[in-house]
Image (cartoon, rainbow, N blue to C red):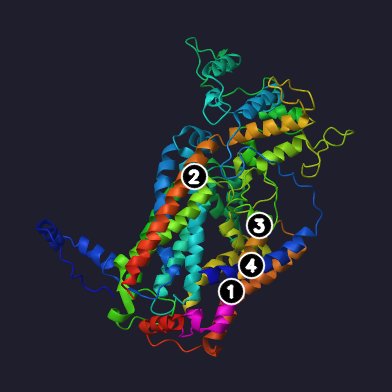
């Protein structure tokens, strides 16, 4: 989409530099001249919001790492006594980081659901979508590792539950778990390596975000009408100033929500049990992950067999990577797919329902509902998508983005 | 965006209500009543006099069994009980603290406390095991207690708890107040109305008249429970006053900025159509 840059720096020094290392031209073609479809709605601002959250998490995380002590005997105190009480504005940085993780996931889920709704995974954006799934996997790993670091009761329980999943793998499971733990149970060596990995993975995420943006700039953005750009003049606007100002506005609104969490309800999303120090002899009465992993936790618990439960848990995420081939309907946007749109909202409700079940203590009735919803979760991908690929009666799609915009204007007038 | 949200919310509410109905069919025990706190709401702050009374309750009652691992100096910090510098010094000096380093002869020694020291553990229970041996369960350190205790709010209340104006962050204080006033079975000193399962390891610790308030506050169990709950809330979250102050500024700034950006965006996009 972008093509060779026509950017020519104004100053002589700029031109000297540009002819040797065309960084400014790259920035110009990627973030200034880059054409974006003119019909994008606010759902398309979550890429910018996610970039903002990633940067916020990395900056606050690096500052926290300067004060945190990654040792089993001191980790809890270094956060709750040192950072939260004595470090200047340590409480602010810590609340930003821990609530930032939640908002990072909230934005990621909206971003992913938008991709599903508007068919952003369809050709030619399959690889772009798969890189996104990899980023999401890395995010869950990073969030899990980070959740262990305060070494509270729930950190310890969470680390135990998740690493124990590896023991379900036949033959190599138990040795693998011992290798991960650095011992025969979650303990001091586990915490130290989790800290190292938690510091490493965000930079891996950043690298994949680079690939994600690169792939995006090759194919161009999808849009609410799901028709490709045909005429750059008529169908698109320049990234700067149009998309930039819209993104900055969206980030500022999202920041208000972020600030609300940080300053007014900083402990709303946190588990009270994690303010008790980890004690291998005392397991919390009710072990639950953070909200953003609850649907997967519900799927795990819905399956009575441990190995199959783990398989279902992994499959629930990995299946996303296959979506470009499960849904073969040439019409991208759910706007023109009434049946798909209906099932999409059912799917959203299923995810939220699974999340609620994941937060509750299991009982027979609950497990029954969890099984039905788990069936629904996979059914959306394995039944609804392939069947609707060929049977759905789609509505006529507009000839071009410009036509779609004009039609909407006429309808409004 | 709005359509997205409304549809997802509507279906989720329907689904969660069905699932939630299943959960509520089970037996429930009473939830701690929601009290009114000076530090609740959007602009609430700690009440200095209440925190001072709460500290008195801690010192005269709770400290017999519970540690409170915070430095003495924090008792003089702004946004807390705000004891004067001299009061904090005198208070710290009234405790005997084990020096972390040995003296020149290599002996570990005790000395009077200074404001920089952490409040020492109760004399009777040098470690958790000693306390557990006496009560069956170690009395928890109280420095984070108000944040380490919550109770299930259930659907749909937990949704409202996050909303501006309705937000609820004082669950720990309500829980502590409820436990202390929950010893309603006079035949059994370890029966508690609000403790999960009703069987609590801590025998009733405090009753009317146990602490002699100097400021004329009625010496009732309810007031003691309220004051210690407020004090422990401060101990767990000493920066709340500052957080609310900065938060208000950030909110005003962000709303103005977002408003200006919105109009800038509108202006920029006018040329695109």
Q: Are marks 1 and 4 in contact (CB under 8 Å)?
A: no
Q: Which residue is mark 3?
A: A359
Residue A38 lies, with reference to residue B136, above or below; the image says: below
Give the residue furthest to the left. Answer: A12
Among the two numbered marks 1 and 3 on one chain, the one whose residue lies closer to the N terminus: 1
> Do tags 1 and 3 sit on the same chain?
yes
Residue A323 lies, with reference to residue A159, above or below; the image says: below
Q: Which residue is mark 1?
A: A345
Percent coordinates x, y for residue B61 in the rendering: 72, 24
> Do tags 1 and 4 sit on the same chain?
no
Magenta segment: A325-347
> Do tags 4 and 3 sit on the same chain?
no
> Do tags 2 and 1 sit on the same chain?
no
Q: Main secondary structure of the magenta part?
A: helix
Subunit of mark 4? B
Among the two numbered marks 2 and 4 on one chain, the one whose residue lies closer to the N terminus: 4
Eye-nearest disc, 1 or 3: 1
Percent coordinates x, y for residue B34 in the rendering: 71, 44
Q: Is residue A385 visible?
A: yes
Eye-nearest disc, 2 or 4: 2
- For marks 1 and 3, give the CA distance: 21 Å
Instruction: Tell me the residue at 51%/64% (across/down).
Output: A109
Q: Quadrant for residue A41, please give it.
A: bottom left
Q: Secondary structure at mark 1?
A: helix
> Do tags 2 and 4 sit on the same chain?
yes
- For marks 4 and 3, give the CA distance: 15 Å
> Do tags 2 and 3 sit on the same chain?
no
Q: Which residue is mark 4?
A: B12
Q: Which residue is mark 2?
A: B248
Eye-nearest disc, 4 or 3: 4
- For marks 1 and 4, give the CA distance: 9 Å
Q: Are marks 2 and 3 in contact (CB under 8 Å)?
A: no
């Amino acid at each position: 989409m972008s093509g060779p840059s026509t950017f020519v720096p104004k100053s002589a020094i700029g031109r000297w530099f540009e002819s040797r290392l065309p960084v400014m031209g790259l920035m110009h073609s990627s973030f200034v001249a880059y054409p974006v479809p003119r019909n994008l709605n606010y759902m398309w601002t979550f890429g910018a919001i996610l970039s903002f959250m990633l940067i916020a998490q990395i900056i606050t995380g690096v500052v926290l790492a300067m004060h945190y002590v990654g040792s089993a005997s001191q980790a809890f105190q270094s956060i709750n006594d040192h950072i939260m009480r004595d470090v200047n504005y340590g409480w602010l940085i810590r609340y930003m980081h821990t609530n930032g993780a939640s908002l990072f996931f909230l934005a990621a889920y909206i971003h992913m659901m938008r991709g599903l709704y508007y068919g952003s995974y369809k050709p030619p954006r399959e690889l772009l979508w798969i890189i996104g799934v990899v980023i999401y996997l890395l995010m869950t790993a990073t969030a899990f590792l980070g959740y262990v670091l305060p070494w509270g009761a729930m950190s310890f329980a969470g680390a135990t539950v998740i690493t124990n999943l590896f023991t379900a793998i036949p033959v190599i499971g138990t040795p693998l778990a011992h290798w991960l733990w650095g011992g025969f149970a979650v303990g001091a060596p586990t915490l130290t390596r989790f800290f190292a990995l938690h510091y490493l993975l965000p930079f891996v995420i950043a690298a994949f975000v680079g690939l994600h943006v690169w792939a995006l700039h090759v194919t161009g953005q999808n849009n609410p009408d799901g028709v490709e750009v045909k005429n750059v003049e008529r169908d698109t606007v320049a990234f700067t100033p149009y998309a930039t100002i819209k993104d900055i506005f969206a980030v500022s609104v999202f920041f208000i929500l972020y600030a609300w969490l940080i300053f007014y309800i900083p402990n709303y999303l946190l588990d009270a049990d994690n303010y008790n120090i980890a004690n291998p002899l005392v397991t919390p009465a009710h072990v639950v992950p953070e909200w953003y992993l609850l649907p997967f936790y519900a799927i795990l618990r819905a399956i009575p067999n441990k190995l199959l439960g783990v398989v279902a848990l992994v499959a629930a995420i990995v299946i996303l990577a296959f979506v470009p081939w499960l849904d073969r309907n040439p019409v991208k946007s759910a706007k023109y797919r009434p049946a798909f749109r209906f099932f999409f909202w059912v799917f959203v409700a299923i995810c939220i329902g699974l999340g609620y079940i994941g937060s509750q203590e299991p009982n027979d009735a609950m497990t029954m509902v969890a099984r039905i919803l788990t069936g629904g979760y996979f059914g959306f991908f394995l039944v609804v998508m392939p069947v609707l690929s060929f049977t759905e009666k789609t509505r006529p799609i507009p000839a071009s983005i410009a036509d779609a915009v004009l039609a909407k204007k006429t309808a409004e007038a | 965006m709005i359509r997205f949200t409304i549809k997802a919310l509507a279906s989720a509410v329907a689904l969660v209500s069905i699932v939630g109905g299943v959960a509520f069919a089970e037996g429930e025990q009473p939830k701690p009543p929601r009290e009114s706190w000076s530090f609740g709401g959007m602009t609430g702050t700690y009440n200095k006099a209440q925190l001072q009374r709460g500290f008195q309750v801690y010192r005269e009652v709770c400290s017999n069994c519970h540690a409170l691992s915070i430095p003495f100096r924090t008792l003089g910090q702004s946004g807390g009980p705000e004891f004067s510098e001299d009061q904090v010094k005198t208070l710290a000096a009234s405790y005997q603290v084990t020096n972390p380093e040995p003296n020149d002869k290599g002996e570990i020694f005790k000395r009077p406390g200074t404001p920089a020291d952490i409040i020492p553990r109760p004399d009777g229970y040098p470690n958790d095991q000693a306390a557990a041996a006496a009560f069956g369960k170690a009395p928890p350190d109280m420095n984070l207690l108000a944040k380490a205790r919550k109770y299930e709010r259930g659907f749909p209340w937990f949704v409202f708890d996050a909303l501006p104006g309705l937000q609820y962050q004082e669950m720990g204080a309500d829980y502590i107040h409820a436990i202390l006033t929950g010893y309603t079975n006079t035949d059994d000193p370890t029966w508690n109305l609000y403790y999960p399962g009703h069987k609590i390891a801590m025998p009733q610790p405090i009753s009317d008249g146990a602490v002699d308030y100097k400021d004329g506050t009625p010496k009732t169990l309810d007031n003691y429970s309220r004051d210690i709950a407020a004090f422990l809330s401060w101990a767990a979250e000493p920066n709340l006053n500052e957080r609310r102050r900065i938060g208000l500024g950030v909110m005003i700034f962000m709303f103005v900025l977002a408003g200006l950006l919105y109009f800038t965006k509108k202006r920029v996009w006018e040329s695109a159509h």
